[in-house]
Image (cartoon, helix red, strand yellow):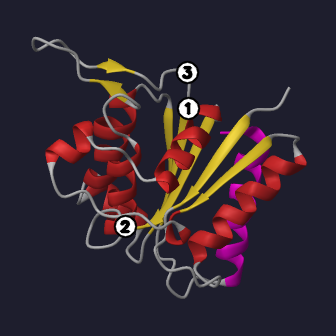
Amino acid sequence: MGKKILIIDGHPDPRPERFVHALARAYREGAATAGHELLDIVVSEIDFPFLRTSEDFRAGTPPRSIRTCQELIMRADHLVILFPLWLGSMPAMLKAFLEQVLRPGFAFDEGAGGRVPKKLLTGKSARIVVTMGMPALFYKWFYRAHSLKSLERNILAFCGIRPVRTTIAGMVDGVSVAKRKALLDSMHALGAAAR
């Protein structure tokens, strides 16, 4: 029996030639071929405000567009989050989306009296796919993949999503045809395996 896979395309630029979109399509095609049920969120197509206060984050009512995304997350067994590395981290639009969607009461329960928050999204796994202009090895070793680790540990695992696997595609600007095909083939295979 196939998994329910939610593909979250986090590139803020909706132009189809962006490599993140091609990677998302390849993952989707692989998953569809293997019979998995597919759900999609394209962050650049969602209209939502940035959160500006902790009160709104904790007790505000999310806009309808965000509630729809929360419903898709609840239905999914596996999340795939794809984005380009901008200024060493995820683009602001994707971060704003995650702040809106992973609110207390949905993604975690803050608890009372200083208790450790309860993780509300347990039973789900994830894959993070990051593209960048620098070599992947340089990002991993010199920068210690800090922003990727933050998303993995401080956001997804905090909400109970695990395991979280990662794919880093470096040097994507002007990537050769052969390397582009290898990366797309890899995404297709990961989609088929729902990993």
Q: From the viewer's perspective, is residue 62 above or below residue 4?
A: below
Q: From the viewer's perspective, is residue 123 above or below residue 149?
A: above
Badge 2 vs badge 1, beta-carbon distance below 8 Å = no
**Which residue is disc 2 drawn over?**
93
The residues colored magenta run: 177-195
**Which residue is disc 3 drawn over?**
123
Q: Secondary structure at mark 2?
A: helix
Q: Secondary structure at mark 1?
A: strand
Kindly identify the amino acid type of the residue bearing the numbered disc 2. Met
**Which residue is disc 1 drawn over?**
125
Distance from disc 2 to disc 1, alpha carbons, whole Å, reads 23 Å
Q: Residue at x 55, y 70 (%)?
A: 45
Query: Which residue is nearer to you in this view: 168 or 77?
Result: 77
Q: From the viewer's perspective, is residue 156 above or below residue 139?
A: above
Query: Where's the N terminus, which quadrant?
Result: top right
- Residue 136 placed where, x, y %? 42, 63
Residue 26 on the magenta segment:
no
Q: How packed is label 2: few (under 14 Cα within 10 Å), some, or many (20 or more)?
A: some
Q: Quadrant of residue 26?
A: bottom right
